[in-house]
Every structure is written in structure tokens, then in C-alpha cells.
Amino acid sequence: MAVRSTQRLQGRTSETRGWAWSRFAAAVVAGLAIILRIGWHEPLLSASFLVAVEMVGLVAYAALLIVPNRMAKRTFGSLFRTHTYESIVLLLGLVLFWSPSALSIIVGLLVLHQLLELYLQVVQTDISTGLVFVGSFVVLIAVGTAGLMLPAATPPDMPIGVLDASFTITSAISQTGLIVRPTGEGFTRFGQIIILIWIQVGALGILVFGALLAQVIGSSFGLRATQTMAESTEQGWTGQLSLQRLVVFIIVITHLVEAIGALVLFIGWPDNWPGSPWANDPTHTPLDRLYHAVFFSVSSFCNAGFSTTSNSMEGLRFNWTSQIVIVGLIVLGSIGFPVLDNLRRVFWAKVRGIRSYNGSLIRLSLNTKIVLFTTVAVYLLGFILILIGEGTQTNQPLNAVLLDAHFMTINRTSGFNTIAPQDMGLLSRLTLILLMFIGGSPASVAGGIKMMVFAVLALTVWSTLRGKPRVEAFGRTIPDELVRKSATLIVMSLAVVMLVTGVLVATEGNGESPTLGPYLFEATSAFGTTGLSMGITSDLGVPGKIAIGVAMFLGRVGPLAVMAALFAIGRARQPNYEYPVEDVVIY
């Protein structure tokens, strides 16, 4: 494995930048041809001409990949090992070149690969990591907004403005799910696919960056040094290849889980239900059913909450297949990559009967133990409170109350709902506000302050009440630095929620005295990237939409960017002096 990794690294570093940029240009030209062909209800140029441009771009990409390797007298086997992903995609293109749709997908995969390569190169520059992360999301939002404003993205009689397009794409890339128009009716299949792609890209970006950051926090290594990044993965890979292998693993796991979820939904969904995507379309085909199953699966795993139905999951409230699959996907997406990776290692170690790897004991990490314990504790708290609220403050039957308490507690990180929040009791809504603020696990697609931050705060309170000078958990001591940074994130998050709520209260209400509850709920949902709403999103004015859009953006990239900055500061040289200690009055 080490020899193969070294060969791949040497193969990449020996190429000139000119060949790499030429492949990037070929992919971009082919991608632009796709946009011109499918971005308008009627193509601006001849469809056959644009397809030919795509094919030429694909052939040029292959030539620009093969020629430099042959000039360096490397074998095709070496080329395949060095450029495995591109080689597989190009081979698929060779087989499926006769299908314009398949050709577009192939070109899209190559464009995505080139953008990812560019991103990894930028990560290794001297630009601030937090700035790179935030800047990449700003660029993606701008590109996605332009995509949704293409005529073919919306029905001819329902064009979308720049504010609503920006709001929708921000909601998609932040995995929030708040919408200003119904996804199923307000966008064409092309527009829905754009939303779906941005959901997936946003989720993968969060997973990759969050996983790297979590590894850095755990190992005290710098994000900038690729060698130390390789060591933090505990695989011994070096340089850029360590990043690529980590990224590939996350991508493979994500798509594998989503594919399984889509297949089960495709098989297990009823033929029809109230609000189904094909309720008013008697001509729908199995491919249409598969498309909606894929949309639901991706949206569920990414904790996005977008749906192509007219009433989210209310029509599937008592469908066990949907309940089990979607809940499972939400949990897997919100549990966090470090936890999934640690569980995978421990499981295979048990299967293989080994206890250590490269001298390190294979065990459940402290991060995994705290996340799993806190997840169960938060679930039980939310389930009990919502059960009480729905049982005493609504007239729902017991089976519906039990299902809603279970689903809505899990759904604290996603935007699906089996019952509209405005139809729930006050205690249930208050509980959801707390759950949405807590959110999911670190290095996951879920938002909120994160389980670990909440756990550190709870452990700090518990240690203080017990008179312990340090914060402890499972026989380990949590560094004071993490306690301070957790407190910083909580205070900043509360400030954002209160500020956005204040903007909504001040600007909405049409001159009347507004009710606080819906606006606090909306602001918390936006910052927690949950997507639940009490039905006021589409009625917000321009200031309200901007405030919610900013909250979604900050809720998605803010905490990670802040954590990256805090740990960058923490790695800097500390001053070699201390001021005298003096007590202050706190109560």
C-alpha cells in the first residue's frame, strides 16, 4: 500500500501545472456546453452541436491525461493507479458516449473532480483555512444562485428572483430546508437537480472540512501541513494523497448509504399517498419514482429536509418503511464522520480478532463515547418532553403522539416533519427550539452548537457541582482549552439567534404587534440548519429573508470557521508571562 501510494504521489507531482490546467479548461468548456443545452427551455444553440462540444471536451480531457503520462514513459497501469477516479469516469464515458444524458453526467463528474482538486490545492496555500472554507461556500452560493435563475430551473410562468434563488440555494448548501416556494411545484426537474447537487456538495464539504478539523483537534496537528494531516488519519499516507484518500472514503460511504436508502424507499413506498410527488401525475414511470426516492435519500442523509412532496412527510406519517429508512439516514448523517470511522475500525478489529494497529490500541475513542452517550440522552429528553406536550396539549391519538415524539426528536437536525410545527403543543415547540439549538455531532452534516459542545457544557456544570477542579468523562480529563472554546461557541451562537430574532420581530408583523414564538422558532431553525418552520418563511419580507439567509450561512460555516480560527490561535506561541490572580464576584 505504501509503495502504491508513493507511486501515485510521484505520478502526480511529476506532471506540469500546464497539463493539469489544460484538463481543467477542457472540463469547464464541456460543462458550459451542458449549461447552454439544458439551462433554457429551448437550447440557445443547436443541441447536436452542444453535444458534440461535450464529446470533444471529453476526448480532449482524455488526451491531456494520457499524453503527459506517455511522454514520461509510464505504463497505462501506472496511469490508472495515479488517476484512478478520472480513468474510471473516462471509461464510463467511452461506454456511454451515445447517451446525451449519460454524457452530461460524465462531464459533470469530471468538472466536480477538477473543482475538488483545485480546492485541495488552495487548502495547502498560505491563505487562512477559515477564509478558504467560508470563501468556497460563498462562491458555491453565487454559482448555485445563477443556476436556479436559469429559465429551465423554474416553470415558465414562475420565474424566480435573485433574492429567492439565493435564499433557496443557501438553504440547500447549508442543509437547512427552509423554503420560500414548494420544491416540487416551484421548480422543474432541472431546478430540483440543482438543489439536490448543492445539498450533496454542501454536505460533502462540511464532512470533509469537519472531519479534518476533528482530526486536527484530536491530534494537535496543523491543518496546513499535509504530512501531519496524513498522520492524523492514522493511515501513514503522505502529502496530498492523504487528503484525497480521506475525501474518497467520505464520498464512498456517503453515496453508498444514500444508494441503499434510495433503493429501500423505491421498493417500500406505497403506490400513492396524500401529497405524493405523482399524486396529480397518472403518467409517472418507475424512473420518476426512483428519482424521488434518490432525492429523499440524499436529502435525508444530508439532513437537508428538502422534499418533492407537497406536505413533507405528513402523508407518510404512518408508513413504517419511510419512518425507519429516513430516521436511519438522518441519524447516520448527523452522528459525525469521526464516530462512524471509529465504529468501523472497532467493528473490523473485532471481526478480525485484533486489538491494535501499528502499535495503537483500537478502541472506542472518548469522542465516540461522549457523542453516543449525549445523543441517547438528548433523544430521551426530547422524546419525553414532546410526548408530554403532544399528549396533554393536543388531541392526537396515542399512536400518532408516540410516532411524532420519536420522529420529531430525531428530526431536530433535519427539516422533515410528520406534523406541522404550528399544530404542535407549546411544550413541544419549546422542546424543538432547544433540540434545534443543540443540533447534531461534530464533523457531521447537522447544524446547531453540536453535541460535543453541549456535552462539554453539561460536564462542566456537573464537575462544578461535584467540586471537581477538572472536567472529566469516562476516565479522561477534557482540556480547559476545549471548555473555553465550547463556551465561546455557545455565547456566539446565542448572540446570532437573538440578533436574527430581533431583526424578524422588528421588521415583520405588518405594523401589528408580532408574536415572538414563530420568529424565535424560525431564527433557531435557520441557525441550527434544521429547516422546521411554523409556516412564516414564504411570507417574510426582504429584511427577514436576508436575516434568515445570513443565519443559515453562519449556522453552517460559522462554527467550523470559528473553531478553525480558535485552534489556529491556540497553536500559536503563547505569551511567557501571567498576570496576578484576583477573584471577582459572580453571584
Image (tube, rainbow, N blue to C red):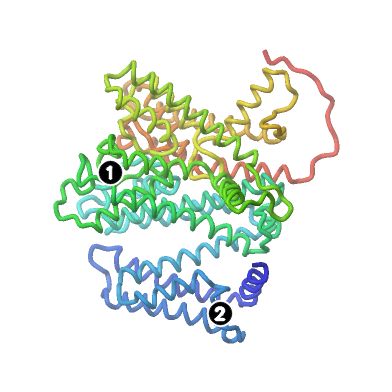
Q: What residue is rendered at 46% in x and 63% in y?
A: 112
Instruction: Give the mark nearest the N terminus, 2 or 1.
Output: 2
Give the percent coordinates (x, y) of residue 452. Answer: 59, 35
Tell me the quadrant of the picture where the N terminus can be found.
bottom right
Say which of 94 and 26 sits in front: 94
Q: Tell me: residue 426, above or below residue 177.
A: above
Which numbered circle lies on residue 15?
Answer: none
Q: Is residue 364 left or right of residue 429?
A: right
Query: Can you give x and y, in whole percent of width and height, for residue 222 in the image?
Result: 70, 52
Q: Position of residue 349 (x, y in %)?
A: 61, 51
The image quarter in which residue 146 lies: bottom left
Per the rendering, the mark at residue 77 is 2
- Which image quadrant is residue 233 in? bottom right
- Distance of label 2 from label 1 (alpha carbons): 49 Å
Q: Secondary structure at mark 2?
A: helix
Q: Amino acid at mark 2?
A: Gly
